[in-house]
Image (cartoon, rainbow, N blue to C red):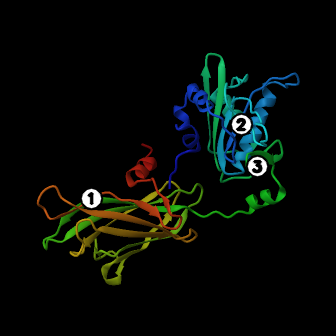
Amino acid sequence: MSERSITQQVLGKSIEKLAYADIVKYFLKPRNESDRIEFKSYVVGRSDKGPKAHLEEVYESLSAMLNSEGGILIWGAPQGEYPTGSKEKLFVGNLTNVQCDRDDDQLNSGILDNLNPMPPNIKHRKLSKGKALVYVFEVTKSPYAPHQFKGTYFARFGAQKRVAPHYLIEALLRRITYPNIAPYLRILSIGRNEHGIFELHFQVLCVNHSRLQSETDISLTIRCMQGKFKFASFNDKRWLISFGGGQLHFKDVKSVLHYGGHHAEQFSIQIDSAVNEGDTVELLLFIGGRTSPLKSSVYSIRVTPCSKDCGKSIVAKTENTLVSSNEKDDDTYDKVLRQLLGH
């Protein structure tokens, strides 16, 4: 399942499309930090140790985000102030100019040299207006945590960056993760058979989203209470249709599904004649593997009147909702396939 990046959530744009003016506009209103948002000002005082010390504070913050839930770091934010009676800083107004000019290669090298183990999924963008600089860092929660900077582990607790306690590091080292596999559905065609019964032809795409974790012995089950499944091939022993034709089970979708890999299957459903205009046909998909928990999705397909006198038609529009978490899944079949193929 995909979601909007933290940068999109906070600033309204992907990090690749940001401009200096977007950061200026963002701080026209008072902003405060959170467990996934950090603002770092660049203030030069009498005891200032120079750009290197400021940059090391950035590395600390990045390691803390990697060891927590990820987040966004804006370096060059306005200087924070404590409102009367508040224990939390508010950041508003003019940006502070970062006096540390680093290009992408220098930033990448600094991150890789200073954070251990090598961190994945850190994006950064240098934004400028004249000689004024501000940096935005986008950090995804790391599958390789815990990370350390100069031999010390950091983590975020609320809006604060702290040295990570022993229990947290121990938990990160002992954690167990499971492959994240998911099914995506697409309607291939809609029509009537020789008996005038509506038939829907589908393709289901099974995808492994887990880095460095392959999954084996993948099974897929599809249920439809308003129709019956048809065999694509009577010689295919992997198929099992049960529950009066309302359930299709693939015994062995794929023996091994690697990260970034995908596998497609096709099937057809005959819609019951009792389904009327305005009714909804629901398909329930269940996918699991040897080590991954069973994941379920539901697709709703609404029957609507056709513009011409042709009886019933099926709108080729689906909604995919993860039943287990009740969250909307924004990934469509075509979007996922384009990502897999690098388009």
**Residue 117 seen in the figure:** no
Farthest residue toward the right? 47
Q: Position of residue 201 (x, y in %)?
A: 27, 64
**Residue 291 seen in the figure:** yes
The residue drawn where x is 52% and y is 50% is 3
Under mark 3, the amino acid is: Ala
Instruction: Look at mark 3 in the image and give the residue it sits on.
Output: 155
Q: In the rendered image, which quarter is residue 278 located in?
A: bottom left
Residue in the foreground of this view, choosing between 30 and 327: 30
Farthest residue toward the left? 309
Residue in the foreground of this view, choosing between 209 and 129: 129
Label 3 crowd bin: few (<14), some (14–19), many (20+), radius 10 Å: many
Question: Image check: 190 left or right of 290?
Answer: left
Which label is found at residue 59? none
- For the residue labelled by badge 3, is the local secondary structure a helix, a strand or a loop? strand
Marks 2/3: CA–CA distance? 21 Å
Marks 3/1: CA–CA distance? 48 Å
Dot in front, 2 or 3? 2
Instruction: Look at mark 2 in the image and give the residue it sits on.
Output: 90
The residue drawn where x is 36% and y is 69% is 283
Q: Position of residue 57 (x, y in %)?
A: 78, 35
- For the residue labelled by badge 1, is the local secondary structure a helix, a strand or a loop? loop
| Quadrant where the image shows the C terminus | top left
Farthest residue toward the front? 84
Question: Image check: 99 left or right of 167?
Answer: left
Farthest residue toward the top? 130
- For the residue labelled by badge 2, is the local secondary structure a helix, a strand or a loop? loop
Instruction: Look at mark 1 in the image and give the residue it sits on.
Output: 315
Query: Between disc 1 and disc 2, whose residue precedes?
Result: 2
Dot in front, 1 or 2? 2
Query: Between disc 2 and disc 3, whose residue precedes?
Result: 2
Under mark 1, the amino acid is: Val
